[in-house]
Image (spheres, grey):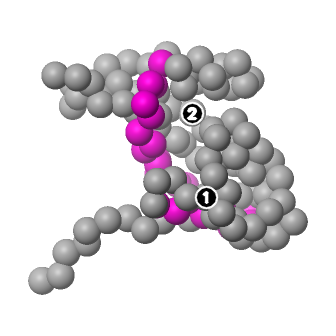
């Protein structure tokens, strides 16, 4: 039986490409590799995995969560607060991660996480 060995990309529907590009590019610091604020599809390269944004006039359903590993989850929390967002404080989880959640401009839940040292 063939195995899935990695994730190539994740695509999110967004209602405003300029607003979403600002959040992912300027606030989170992701590298835009395709598209711009004037088109309906953009891609960011996150260390070889692609985060795609697709423009939609409406969002049709619930979304799960994307988990991003950070080099310092507490500094990411501080950065987001300074950028005008209000995420809850990071906490340590029993599965070995420190994390917090924040929503992007369209309400997609993002988990910012860091593995705890043993």
Do the residues bearing badges 1 and 2 touch, measured as CB atoms within 8 Å? no
- Quadrant housing the N terminus: bottom left
Which residues are drawn in magenta? 49-74
Q: Residues within 10 Å of mark 2 (few under 14, many from 20)?
A: some
Please give the name of the residue rendered at 57% of the width and 33% of the height, measured from the top-left corner: 102
Total number of numbered labels? 2
Residue 100: where, in percent of width, then height? 46, 27
Please tell me whether mark 1 or mark 2 is closer to you in this view: 1
- Looking at the image, residue 32 sits to the left or right of residue 48; the answer is right
- Looking at the image, residue 22 sits to the left or right of residue 5; the answer is right
Q: Residues within 10 Å of mark 1 (few under 14, many from 20)?
A: many
Please give the name of the residue rendered at 29% of the width and 31% of the height, measured from the top-left corner: 115
Residue 97: where, in percent of width, then height? 30, 29
Residue 17: where, in percent of width, then height? 79, 57
Q: Is residue 86 visible?
A: no
Q: Residue beneath label 1, please?
A: 44
The quarter of the picture where residue 68 lies is top left
The quarter of the picture where residue 116 lies is top left
Residue 79 to residue 52: above or below:
above
Q: Residue beneath label 2, please?
A: 102
Is residue 60 highlighted in magenta? Answer: yes
- Quadrant housing the C terminus: top left
Q: CA distance from mark 1 to mark 2?
A: 19 Å
Return the disc, 1 or 2, that comes first in the chain's sequence.
1
Secondary element under disc 2, as helix, strand or loop, is: strand
- Looking at the image, residue 117 sits to the left or right of residue 109; the answer is left
Secondary element under disc 1, as helix, strand or loop, is: strand
Is residue 3 highlighted in magenta? Answer: no
Residue 8 to residue 30: above or below:
below
Residue 10 to residue 93: above or below:
below
Residue 25: mark: none
């Amino acid at each position: 039986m063939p195995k899935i060995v990695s994730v190539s990309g994740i695509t999110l529907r967004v209602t405003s490409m300029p607003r979403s590009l600002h959040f992912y590019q300027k606030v989170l610091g992701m590298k835009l590799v395709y598209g711009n604020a004037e088109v309906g599809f953009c891609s960011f390269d996150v260390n070889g995995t692609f985060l795609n944004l697709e423009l939609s006039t409406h969002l049709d359903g619930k979304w799960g969560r994307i988990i991003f590993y950070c080099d310092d989850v507490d500094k990411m929390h501080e950065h987001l607060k300074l950028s005008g967002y209000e995420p809850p404080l990071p906490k340590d989880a029993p599965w070995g991660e420190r994390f917090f959640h924040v929503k992007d401009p369209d309400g997609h839940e993002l988990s910012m996480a860091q593995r705890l040292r043993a």
